[in-house]
Amino acid sequence: MKTRRLTMAQAIIQFLQNQYVERDGMERPFFAGCFGIFGHGNVAGIGQALQQMPDFRYYQTRNEQAMVHTAAAYAKMRNRLQTFACPTSVGPGATNMVTGAAGATINRLPVLLLPGDVFARRNVAPVLQQLEMPYSQDFSANDVFKPVSRYWDRINRPEQIITSLPEVMRVLTSPADTGAVTLALPQDVQAEAYDYPVALFEKRVWTIPRPLPDARLLQRAADLIKSSQKPLVVAGGGVIYSAATDALAAFVSQTGIPVGETQAGKGSLRYDNPLNLGAIGATGTFGANIMAREADLVIGIGTRYSDFTTASKTAFQNPDVRFININIAEFDAYKHSGLPLTGDARETINVLAGLLAGWMVGAEYRARAEKFNQDWDAEVERIYNLGHEPLPSQGEVIGAVNSFSDERDVVLCAAGSAPGDLHKLWRTRDPKGYHLEYGYSCMGYEIAGGLGAKMACPDREIYVIVGDGSYLMLAQEIVTSVQEGVKLTIILIDNHGYGSIGALSRSLGSQGFGTRYLFRDERTGQLPTDEMPMSEAVESYLPVDYAANARSLGAHVIKVDAIPDLKKALAEAKKQTKTTLIYVETDRYAGVPGYESWWDVPIAEVSEIKSVQESRAEYEKARENERYFL
């Protein structure tokens, strides 16, 4: 057997750059390269390997959590067919990635994490940044990755990667089981040499399958659909990852079944498809939520039925409602006691279309759905043109960006009140035009995710919408975007604090406590609530200069005061060749309404505050609509 003597770190990089994926006859390298920050736990291992293997491109980043978000966003834009590796040093460099790992796994996005680890040989322990436990030496801080990884391993001997790396690829390329994969790499073992079999480094192509469900289950599903009077499709992210958008459009045109879209599934149909009811659930449209409430059959396609999608199990109120679940993951296909069609979304939709040839919903039901589509577009237009003063509303900001953007441009967001408003209001014209991280809704994802999205599709404009709270958490990757010449347009919305949670707090009777960026009240010793009059609040705002901050990181900055100025700024930003940040202040209290929906956020059962008592009474009444689906 031919061998090649390499360090363990060199062997890993050599292996990764020879892994390919193939779907529908199209082949591509699975790894686009490597993000990373070097420290004493990896600089002489993975760092040295990357230096001598420049074909596996290395990108310098500023924050370990951010680089995982960037890799996940890249994978999302590439329909999970390509990603990055993310090596770090030992200690805080490693554990900084845990939040990103959780986000990747929750959103079913492949990312490879290569954190440095403590010495496997132990003789010099405890080393710098080592977490010691008195009950075991076989333990390190990297064990925290276990619950947020789809696969986890620690490489204590250099030859262990021979069997571990193929398992890494099996999970990363699995459409059902993908997520964050973690290989903990002891810093001493990274530098150890071994005679590896040359066959380990040969090109390997991993085929992404398109399996079909059992034929009898498909027939049962078709029979259920034919016997339904008010069927509804819930389109999730699996529609887009499977490249099933054209198949879905043909299916609904043929059958007349209307569609509600989840956050991950928004873009499954164009916004102006007459059977697209738009967003569904807690952040849904009135049409989608009314038809969900009445539906006697729900066809979930590529959705995991999060609480936002189901409005905390209150969305589907028909006492006889049944579920058909098309999902590549068996775990999701069985949810809500549904008929499980475990398989690829595109191929399953096409087979069902054939089994339903000649059948369609009643003309009145179809016409009702089409009317809801038209009425919702009018509501969007109303919110886009509120003319709110003296500060614009967030809905108007979204409208300006949406109206200015081209069909293939991308809006990207993750946390705060903007995701809910975007879910309702954004007119999606391209399957990849709407990029929301809402499985984890992670503050700080936005700018890092925008970087990954732009790297995945450099021919599209990326519009990152981020609130002031999220910006303050993780803005450093502006530096990376400037360094790499990856241009973003960032719309920073300043509502002076955590606007989303402020609104939620007020709705729960808690008056926005702890959600505004204000100086402490010297008279009471407390942080002011949202009950403080606006005139006093303005005088108490924290003097954070976001424009100056972004400029110091290398961005071109434009400050605007009104919607007409924002439209001019967007035109100027498009001409720029480097990352541009547009700063706009909005009215904290001018929100987009809720439409026929609810979200379960538990309220204190006992309280001395009257507004909390009142909210608790309303909460208990609303909870009566929560259902089990057995």
Image: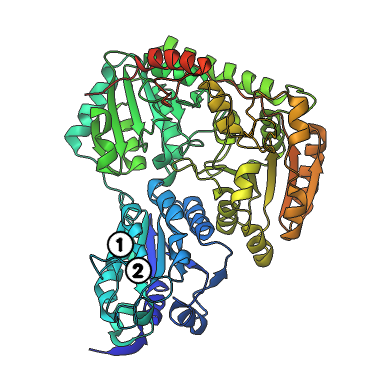
Q: Position of residue 77 (x, y in %)?
A: 51, 51
**Near-viewer residue (39 or 287):** 39
- In the displayed structure, 87 sits above or below 201; it is above
* Type of amino acid at the residue the image marks with label 2: Ala
The answer to whether 79 appears left or right of 510 in the picture is left
- Please tell me how crowded label 2 is: few (under 14), some (14-19), or many (20+) other residues with Cα within 10 Å: many
Q: Residue at x 26, y 80 (%)?
A: 159
* Residue 542 appears in the figure: yes
Is there a contact, CB below 8 Å, between mark 1 and mark 2?
Answer: yes
**Near-viewer residue (291 or 585):** 585
The residue positioned farthest toward the top in the image shown? 364
Q: Quadrant of the C terminus?
A: top left
Q: What residue sits right under mark 1 in the picture? A: 152
**Considering the numbered disc 2 on the image, is that residue within a helix, a strand or a loop?**
strand
Q: What residue sits right under mark 2 in the picture? A: 184
Colour scheme employed for the rendering of this structure: rainbow
The answer to whether 84 appears left or right of 162 in the picture is right
Q: Position of residue 222 (x, y in %)?
A: 26, 26
Q: Position of residue 303 (x, y in %)?
A: 37, 36
In the drawing, what numbered circle is on residue 602? none
